[in-house]
Image (spheres, helix red, strand yellow):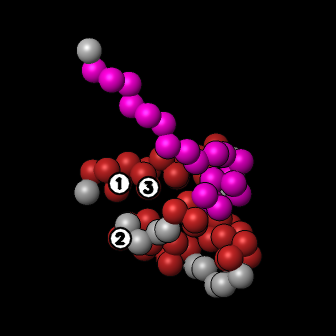
Amino acid sequence: MERIMSIIVELKKILLDVNVSLSELAQSLGKHLNKPYSMQNLSNKLRNETITHREMLIIADILGYDLKFVRKEEKK
């Protein structure tokens, strides 16, 4: 559960940095996917771990970020 909360906390930090509310993000996400999104719906998806990779890529793009996998450094 801690990992999930950190994702939500990190997203909220980014939203503050770019001056976008969760409601505005949900509305933009809905426009990109051509389906209705509410702040509650987006919040629930994040909390319940049901958000898709595609949705996260779109969220990153909306906020001006890239979402990518980075290989962990090997332990010596």
Task: Write the residue at 52% across / 72% down.
Answer: 42
**Badge 3 density bin: few <14, some 14–19, many ≥20, Cα 10 Å:** some
Task: Answer whether residue 74 is magenta in the image.
Answer: yes
Q: Is residue 4 left or right of residue 10?
A: left
Q: Position of residue 41 (x, y in %)?
A: 50, 78
Identify residue type, mark 1. Answer: Met
Task: Write the residue at 33% across / 23% down.
Answer: 74
- Residue 48, disc: 2
Q: Identify residue for label 1.
A: 5
The magenta region covers 57-75
Task: Answer whether residue 20 is magenta in the image.
Answer: no
Residue 76 vs 73, above or below: the answer is above
The residues tagged by marks 2 and 3 sit, at their Cα atoms, a distance apart of 11 Å
Sequence-first tag of 1 and 2? 1
Q: Depth check: 34 or 44 in front? A: 34
Task: Write the residue at 37% across / 67% down.
Answer: 49
